[in-house]
Image: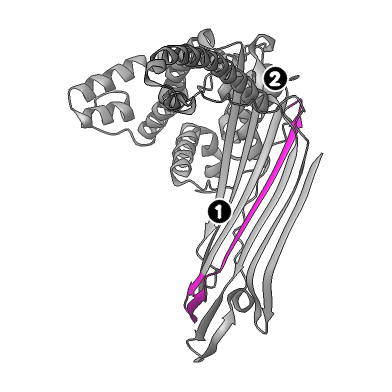
Amino acid sequence: MTTGHILSDLTTTIPSGKVGLYFERQWSGGDRSHGSSRPVKPVSPGSFHDFVVSSGIQNLRKGDRVAHMDNLLSRWRSMRDSYNLQLHAYHKQKAEWRKSLKTELHSYSLRLMSQRHGTCSYRNIPGNWGSEFSSSSGAFGSVNPSVTWNNNDEISLINKVQGQLDGGVGFHLGVSLAEADQTFRMIRDNARRFRRIGESLVAGDINKAFRVALNGSSAHHIRGLRGLKTASDNYLLFMFGVIPLVDSVIDAARHYGYKAARARVIRVSAKREIEASVAGPSHGFWTQRGSTTIKGQVIAYIDTNELTDEEGAFDLPSILWERLPYSFVVDWWFNVGNYLTALHTSRLTSGSRFCRTQTTRVKIGDYGTGSIYSISPISPSSLSVVQVERNISSVLAVPPPRMKPLLHPKSEVMLTHALEAVALITKKSHIFKPAFEKLGL
């Protein structure tokens, strides 16, 4: 076990707070094996000219130099050939050594903190009072950009491991087959309408394509709620029928192409990163930019001969979930689909060794003028914290999913969900109609 602690506190305290530099590093982790010492590179014999000069040939008579030169050349060539053989062996040993370092997984933890407590002069603008020399951190404190790594992030990271196993395409044969019969039925029932929409688009008649999408025909009148229901059916068919079918065919081809050419032992490396940043306290009296980043990573060396059911053909939980009507609506808020896929990945890779690393970085910059305080830095202020936790395990533990925010933080995803929700409600309007009539709506 290797442990250590370095502390350098060069701060001093003045009435308003701390000033100066502070550095601390604390770590602990398992030692590497004694057999992993770095190979030593052989010493080069140098150029022939340098070898001749070092031999002292200039001290011989001119008549003896020619005969001695032939002997020197023979010796230098022998040394050069020996060096080349040693150099070749060195590079092979170095490659094996570097490979052993990567595959030799061991736990490790690190906390690194660097603080610079600067000084500043500031003035309270409304009150017209302030200080000409003050500790910045003592006078204004520090922002705290907060971000949390939750169960959904862990599930997403494990799904990225599955993506590395199938060549980064995310192919799942079981789910594709579970959706196939419904997809083909939807396409069969609407094939004529899609053909007419396509013909209208190719001809450049956008209005006709729109009417066909709403009415099912090119009639010039719009059929009210029925037309809106038809458009909703088309939208849901396209989003959950046509697109998944095309993607599944492409992903299957890419997956089997990757699988046919991959090595017996593959290195899997999956990463996920989340970040939060702020420009200062929410009140805006002064500014101080800061950011917090959390990066999760999983590394493993996996023997592909030990993997079974890579395509997910027997992943019954995921297949049954996809067969449930409107399961995609539940996935908007509870990540059940990805959770079941992650469980399949965990079962698929059980017995392998995984190196799970989580790195948290916090960076906070200098202070600036805001709505209340005018700040002029005299010496800079900053804060940097790095926290690393690395664990070794023989299984990928899958936590249960957490509920997502009601409104997705990404506007494009929120818009997609809204369109799908409107289309779904319109499609099922006949179910809600009696309830509306009872309410007098």
Viewer-closest of 59 and 405: 59
> Which mark is drawn over residue 276?
1
Placement of the N terminus among the 4 image quadrants: top right
Whether residue 371 is in magenta: the answer is: yes
Q: Position of residue 51 (x, y in %)?
A: 47, 24
Whether residue 231 is in magenta: the answer is: no
> Magenta stretch?
367-395
- The quadrant in which residue 158 appears is top right
Pointer 2 local density, CA inside 10 Å: few below 14, some 14–19, many at least 20: many
Report the side of 311 relative to 221 (left or right): right
> Which mark is drawn over residue 43?
none
Looking at marks 1 and 2 on the same chain, the residue that comes earlier in the sequence is marked by: 1
Residue in view at x 45 percent, y 20 percent: 247
Q: Position of residue 428 (x, y in %)?
A: 50, 32
Report the side of 396 relative to 426 (left or right): right
Viewer-closest of 162 and 362: 362
Q: Amino acid at mark 2?
A: Thr
* Way the structure is coloured: one colour
Q: CA distance from mark 1 to mark 2?
A: 33 Å
Q: Position of residue 338 (x, y in %)?
A: 62, 30
Q: Amino acid at mark 1?
A: Ala
Pointer 1 local density, CA inside 10 Å: few below 14, some 14–19, many at least 20: some
Q: Position of residue 204 (x, y in %)?
A: 18, 27
Report the side of 336 relative to 199 (left or right): right
Dominant secondary structure (helix, strand or loop) of the stretch shown in magenta:
strand
Q: Give the residue at mark 2.
A: 349
In this picture, is 342 found above or below 9?
Answer: above
Furthest residue to the right? 1
Residue in view at x 42 percent, y 18 percent: 246
- The quadrant in which residue 206 appears is top left
Residue in view at x 60 percent, y 24 percent: 268
